[in-house]
Amino acid sequence: MTATPNQALLRKLPSISDLLATETVQGWLVEYPRELVAYCLRDAVNELRRQILADTGGRCGAMHVSPEYVLEQAYLLLIDRTRPHIRGAINATGIILHTGLGRAVWPSRVVDSMTEELKGYVTLAIDKETGERLDRDRQIEYILTELTGAEAATVVNNNAGATLLVLAALAAEREVIVSRGQLIEIGGAFRLPDVMEQGRARMMEVGTTNRTHLRDYEKAITEQTAAILRVHPSNFRVVGFTAEVPAAELAGLAHARGLVFIDDLGAGALVDLTRFGLPHEPTVQESLAAGADVVLFSADKLIGASQGGIIVGKKEAIARIRKHPLARALRADKTCLMALERTLMLFRDPELLAREHPLYRMLSTSPEKLRNRAKSLAAAIQRAAPGVELEVIDGVGYLGSGSLPMEALPTKVVALTMPGMKAVELARRLRFDDACVCARIEQERVLLDVRTMRDDEVAKAAEAVGRVL
């Protein structure tokens, strides 16, 4: 029987032992472990075998089974497996808290202050006075109570975990009243009814999607009720014919009936955002002043630190939360707590916060500075890639990560078009470049939004455009 062209090509694929004996691979073995090199060689050969078997149009030929080509493919795999996959990127999307890009950028002074200390041991959970072990969250409780006015505070690894822990600790096997207009679902399949179930609390829905009144909460209270829960709809807005009950009224009702009032603020504003030209967002301090027993919020959104869930409130409630078994399962690690403490220190000084915190610096960037940065980027791209068509235009960005979802931030963008190349391909190439420039696409143009770029990233982004083209 005559062999098919595909079978003939398969027989010409070099063996792993022959590839390992080549001078090229011997050079690799000086730097990389033999097992890893062999793994990449096998992967490359197996992928080429799959391509040949799937080839019905005669696209595969002798060059695809040559040792040189196989080694080229294996080397790409080797580089991919020896470089960290979580690494630096240039955010040109205009979304400040971009979840895919790590949400908030940490302040330089925070990173610099941690770098040397993380090379050794740190005082994560030790009482320096006695030498005894200490609950790690107590190490930063002082600054959380100072900034918010709460009696006590604790920290877990994210705000979804904080919600779960609070419900489990304060309302297990009992009822929690919540407005139908606050039954949120956020990214990653976090749905409030499911979290209620996992926390072993029984959810009691009141009101309607767009209107809930104090009397709705009053009618729902029974002997089985443990708490009233208010959830701030961080990632959506209901507008028009709406009504919701102010926090102070919910707190008054809860305390009059011996219940706990829990306020889940989500993004967790510690400062008045109107200072940065944004709509007012309920602050943690306002919630506590209104009478909330427990307030929970994210550490990596409007605080702009590491991923974490912060719980502040009355001492008795925080003590019960700390003692719950889930608290250990959800506890934050040293990196989270160190970054959070150092970031919170910036909130003591409004001027320092606006100057040193990347989130608030991006929010307060002047139109003139955005315009100048966009012009500099356009000029640098024109020099690096003369064939590209570009234009500096007005655009809009967003805070992102479920914070102020309807609030557009006016900005400047550089719109790119490369004749003969689709926008999606240009954007893909920019992401795969060493600089990893992440942009957005509108109307078949790649948009580079300068609000989320630093001045020192302008030249790097332009060079990346030149390389990929």
Image: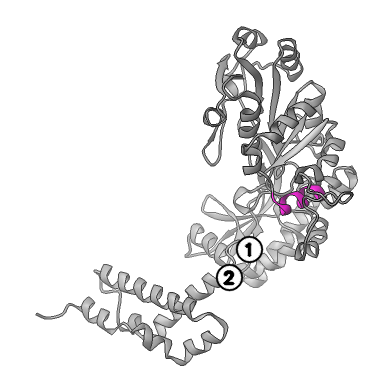
Write the residue at 74% across / 46% down.
304
**Label at residue 87:** 1
Dot 1 falls on a residue whose secondary structure is: loop
**Label at residue 83:** 2
| Amino acid type of the residue that numbered disc 1 sits on in the rendered structure | Arg
Q: Based on the displayed image, in which of its 4 quarters is residue 40 positioned?
A: bottom left
- Residue 215 seen in the figure: yes
Q: Is residue 338 left or right of residue 196?
A: right
Query: Is residue 339 rendered magenta in the image?
Result: yes
Compared with 263, 19 (above or below) is below
Snapshot colouring: one colour
Compared with 262, 157 (above or below) is below
- Give the residues in magenta: 333-343
Question: In the image, residue 79 lies at what x, y percent?
Answer: 53, 74
Q: Nearer the viewer, residue 258 or 413?
A: 258
Q: Is residue 157 left or right of residue 362?
A: left
Say few, some or many: other residues with alpha carbon within 10 Å of mark 1 (under 14 / 14 to 19 / 20 or more). Answer: few
Q: Nearer the viewer, residue 84 or 371?
A: 84
In what quadrant of the picture does the N terminus appear?
A: bottom left
Measured Cα–Cα span from mark 1 to mark 2: 9 Å
Compared with 195, 448 (above or below) is below
Query: Are circles 1 and 2 on residues that touch, CB within 8 Å?
Result: yes
